[in-house]
Image (spheres, rainbow, N blue to C red):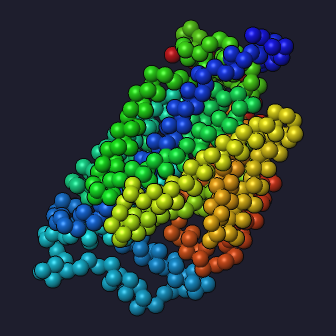
Amino acid sequence: MIHNLYDYNHNQKCIPYSKNCASSLTRVILCFFSFLAIINAYTMRLCLDVSLNRIVLDCKEEHVDQRKTKDNWILDLAVAINQTAFLVSSRLAAGKEEKLKPQPAQQQQKRLEPMPHTTGEWHSHTGISCAELWSRQSQSLVIISFYAGYMLTHIPGGRLAERYGGKWILGSAILLAAILTLLTPSAVRVGGPSALVAIRLLIGLCEGPTFPAVSAMLAQWVPEQERGFLGSCVLSGGEIGITLLQLVSGLVMAEQDWPVAFYVVGGGAVFWFAGFAMICYSKPDNCPYIKSEEKDYIKSQVSDTLIFSAQDGNAMATIPPPPWRSMLLSTPVWALISASMQHDWSRPELSQELQDVLQELKAQGSTMWDEVVASLTLTAPHIGNWVASLSTGSLSDFLISEGILSRTQTRRLMSWLVFICGSMYMVYVKANFGKVWSCLAVGAYYAGIKLLPLDMSPNYAGTLMGISNGLGSLPNLLMPYLKELEEKYAIVGSIRAALWLICTSYISGDVQSYNQLGTHTPIAN
C-alpha cells in the first residue's frame, strides 16, 4: 500500500515511501552481522586478558629451556620498560626533573632479577622457570602488544573499506584474527611470552580495520532517520561481547582449561565469517537480495553527498583520497578524537574485574554458573550499557525526525548526558543504583560521540572512524601511567572534566566541508 508521503533522491526525483520498503529486512540483516562482527572483535581482544592469570599458573609446573627463548629478549625488554616506568614515576612524585639516587634504582633492578636455580647463577645454557619468563612486566607487555598493532591499521583499514567496500575488509579482519586466536594456545606452549607478544601484535593489526570498515558499510546502508538506533545498536556490540566472554571465561576458568576460551571465540568468529560472506554486501547496489523499493528508500534517506560506488559494466566509481589537511585542521575532528580518548581512559579494567569475582567464587568453592547473583552482578552493567545505547539512539532519532533539535544539537545533548551521568556515577559509585548512571553515560556515548564519523563525513566515514577510534585507543597503551598520574594528582580529573566540556561545545553532527567531492573518475576492474 502506497502512502501519500514522498521523499526525494539526490536528483530530486519523487520516490514513494512505502511500508514495505521501510520494513524490509535487508539492511537490518546487514546491521545484525555487523553487530556480530563487533562482538567477535571484542571477545577475541579480551580473551587473553581474562586468561592470562590461568596461563601463568599452568606454566609454573613446566620448565622452559633458555635455549628455546633465544636469549629471552622479552624479559630484557620487560625489565627495561619497568626501569623506565620507575624513573617516570619517581620524577612525577618529586615534581621536578632530577637524577634519581642510585640506591632505589638498584633495588628495583635487584627485585626484577630472576630467582637463582639450584646452580645459584644465571647462565644462558641453563633453564629458566616460567615464573621468571612470565614476570609482571612481561604480562603487561603481552597485553599492550595488541593495542600497539590495533592502532596502526585503523586508518589504512578505513581507506581500503572506502576504496574497495567494507565487506571483504571487515570479513578478512575478523577471519585472520580468528585464525590467530585459534593458534594462540599452541603459540603459548611452544614459544612462551615472546611468541604470545608476536601473535597478539598480529591480532591487533588484523582487528584494527573492524570499526572503520563497519562505519563505511553503515554509511551506505543505514538511512539518516534510523542512524541513531541502528548505528548505536551495532557500534555498542562490544558490550554484549564483553558479557559473552565473561560467561565463557567463567566456565572454562572454573574447569581450569584456558585454551577452550580461545577455541570457542575463535571458532565462533570463523562461523560468523561464513554467514557474513554469503549474505552481506558492501553497498545496496551490490546486493542481489534487496528489493528495489528498499534500495530506493535507502538511497533517498542517506546523506545527499554520499556517493554510491556501484558496479556498472566494466568500471567502478570511486571517491578521491580524503583531504587530509582539511580533516586534521578541523576543530570538530579533534573534539571527536579527544572525546574518544577520554572514553577509553574511563573504561574499567574488565579482566581484573572478572578475575576478582572468580577468585572470590573459588574461595567459596563455587563457580559463576552456580552463583547466579555473582554472574548477574558482573554481566548486568554491560547489558544495561547496550540497552541504554538503544534507548538513547531511539531518542536521538525522534528528536531529529520531529525537528525538535538539529543533528548537532542532539549529538551535543548526548555528550552532555555522558558528562552529567558520569559525574553522578562518581558521586554514587558505592550506592546500589550507582551503576544505573554509568549505563546511561555509556549508552549516551554510543548515541552521540560514536556516531559522529557517520554524521560528519559519510563519504569518508571509514577514514574518520579510523582517525578517532585509532587515536582514541592510545590510553590503552598508557593506562598504567595514566592511572598512576590520576591517583597522584587530583587536578588531572578536573582537567579531564574541563576537556570533555570543551569537546561537547565543539563537536558537530553536520556534514563537513571536506566531505564534498569533486569529480570522480571510473577505474577499470
Is residue 141 something that shows in the picture?
no
Where, quadrant-wise, is the N terminus in this rendering?
A: top right
- Residue 193 x, y percent position in the rendering: 30, 60
Q: In this rendering, is residue 332 above or below 210? A: below
Question: In this view of the protein, which residue sits in the foreground, 183 or 138?
Answer: 183
Question: Looking at this rendering, what residue extends furthest in the top direction?
Answer: 313
Q: How many marks?
A: 0
Question: In this view of the protein, which residue sits in the foreground, 351 or 166?
Answer: 351
- Residue 298 x, y percent position in the rendering: 69, 21
Q: In this rendering, is residue 252 above or below 216? A: below
Q: Residue at x 62, y 39 (%)?
A: 233
Q: Residue at x 50, y 37 (%)?
A: 36
Q: Residue at x 64, y 27 (%)?
A: 220
- Residue 484 x, y percent position in the rendering: 55, 74
Left or right: where 21 falls relative to 240 = right
Is residue 394 something that shows in the picture?
yes
Q: Residue at x 68, y 17 (%)?
A: 21
- Residue 334 x, y percent position in the rendering: 71, 52
Question: In this view of the protein, which residue sits in the foreground, 48 or 254?
Answer: 254
Q: In this rendering, is residue 205 above or below 491? A: above
Left or right: where 125 falls relative to 71 = left
Left or right: where 402 falls relative to 108 = right
